[in-house]
Image (spheres, helix red, strand yellow):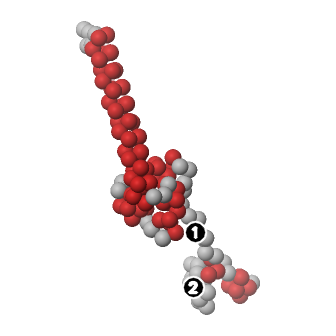
Amino acid sequence: MKLFDSMELQNLKDGLVDKIFRRESEMIINLRNVETRIKEQHQMNVTEFFEMCLSDDMELVDISELAGCSVGNLKRIARKHKFSFELAKPTPMFSENNHFKLRSLNNNNFLSRQWIKMSA
């Protein structure tokens, strides 16, 4: 029993290729539209726009609303322009924790020198 002949398989293959190509081209067009929209509305290139938004302490959701696209598209555009939204936040020192400074023994300060000295 033959399920598909070679012509039907070729038609299925062509249909899938067309569908994939159409989807990719829609994504590229959408990215270009967002980039041109940013350039036209804000009179600056995309990286300058991102830097301006980050200097104003805007979240990704706010930037995407301002740009008129989704957060995913915004991240894709940023990757394309080699821009990173991730700002390295300094890790606070463990000794700056208020629970560490307490005089009583707790989960945060049980390895503190003061408790080690007292137990020795």
Q: Nearer the viewer, mark 1 or mark 2?
A: 1
**What residue type is disc 1 on?**
Lys
Q: Residue at x 62, y 81 (%)?
A: 96
Q: Can the viewer see residue 86 in this picture?
A: yes
Label 2 SS: loop
**What residue type is disc 2 on?**
Asn
Answer with the quarter of the image where residue 18 lies: top left
Q: Where residue 30 sits in the image (x, y, percent)?
A: 37, 45
Q: Earlier in the sequence, mark 1 or mark 2?
A: 1
Label 2 Cα crowd, 10 Å radius (few <14 / some 14-19 / many 20+): few
Q: Where residue 54 sits in the image (x, y, percent)?
A: 50, 66
According to the picture, the residue beneath numbered tag 2 turns out to be: 98
Name the quadrant of the C terminus: bottom right
Q: Closer to the camera, 119 or 24?
A: 24
Q: Residue at x 71, y 82 (%)?
A: 113
Q: Is residue 92 above or below residue 74?
A: below
Answer with the quarter of the image where residue 105 lies: bottom right
According to the picture, the residue beneath numbered tag 1 turns out to be: 89
Q: Residue at x 45, y 58 (%)?
A: 43
